[in-house]
Image (cartoon, rainbow, N blue to C red):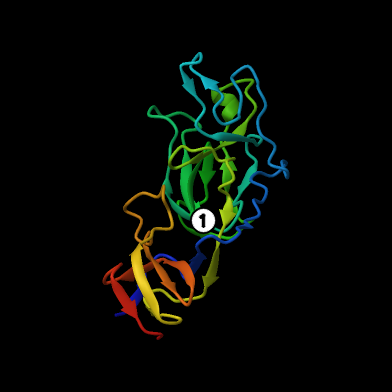
Amino acid sequence: MRLYILFGFLLLAVICSCGVDASQVKFGPLCSGNPSNHIRECDKKGCGAYGAPRNNGKGKHEGLDIVCADGATVFAPFDVKLNGKAVPYRVNNAINDGVNLSGGGLCFKLFYVKPIKYSGTLKKGQKIGTLLPMQKVYPGITSHVHVQMCDRSDPTNGDWTHECLDIVCADGVTVLTPFDVMLNQKAAPYINQPKKEPINNGTTLSGEGLSFKLFYVKLDRYSGTTLKKG
């Protein structure tokens, strides 16, 4: 049986070991003028921390606000894929723009940003876009980029880690077993990724005393099969 790399990334067969120590993905500067990614402190419009009160205590802030001046450049914090437009408001205004992104096993959104594009890939530190005029809509607020996970979980809960080894592999090529393995079950790299994402697929395998996962591959079946090396 063959395994195929899904389309969507130019490289990437990803091997993730089960139960090994995670190596950190370095979260680079998100905005020019704020190299330390300083979080918005409380101002007259509210606070920028995740879970901060909203709507007079009836709701909570479901993202994290990174300080960024109006018109400043917004950068990719690590290597990312752009997955389309994202907007924070149902009613349009001057800051109602943003982008969906994925990378490092995460799915997240950036709001109040005018991207230079809504699809494709960017390397860490490349320009995503510019911050829109927050002062025009919310005078006196601390202008910021709003970072929101696709599942609305806390962006600061320690999930910004990369627990995998990326093996270069062209789109559509055959993926071979590195040694005799048992296919155990389906595995998806993005637990909070939209279902339509074509690369959100993979499998859990075991063999040679190891348990690991292969991501971004399409299989004929995902369990109950033993495959020989190669």
Residue for point 55% across, 68% down: 165
In this rendering, the answer to whether 21 lies above or below 69 is below
Q: Quadrant of residue 158?
A: top right
Q: Which residue is mark 1?
A: 103
Please state if 43 lies on the left or on the right of 194 as rendered: right
Question: Looking at the picture, how far across and down is residue 73, in whole percent?
Answer: 64, 45
| Nearer to us in this view, 82 or 194 | 194
Residue drawn at x 29%, y 80% as measured from the top left: 1
Q: Residues within 10 Å of mark 1 (few under 14, many from 20)?
A: some
Between residue 217 and residue 10, name the one nearer to us. 217
Residue 46 position in % (x across, y down): 59, 20
Give the amino acid type for the residue marked by disc 1 in the picture: Gly
Is 199 above or below relative to 112?
below
Q: Position of residue 120 (x, y in %)?
A: 46, 59
Q: Is residue 51 left or right of residue 187?
A: right
Q: Nearer the viewer, residue 182 or 121?
A: 182
| Rendered image quadrant of residue 119 | bottom left
Does residue 46 appear to the left or right of 7 in the view shown?
A: right
Residue 90: x and y, percent?
Answer: 38, 29
Q: Residue furthest top?
A: 56
Vertically, is 142 above or below 26?
A: above
Q: Residue at x 43, y 41 (%)?
A: 151
Whether residue 27 is visible here, answered yes or no, is yes
Q: Quadrant of the C terminus?
A: bottom left
Query: What is the quadrant of residue 126 in the picture?
Result: bottom right
* Above/below status of 121 relative to 176: above
| Count of residue discs | 1
Secondary structure at numbered mark 1: strand
- Residue at (57, 41) in percent of width and height: 157
Can residue 12 be seen in the rendering of this structure? no
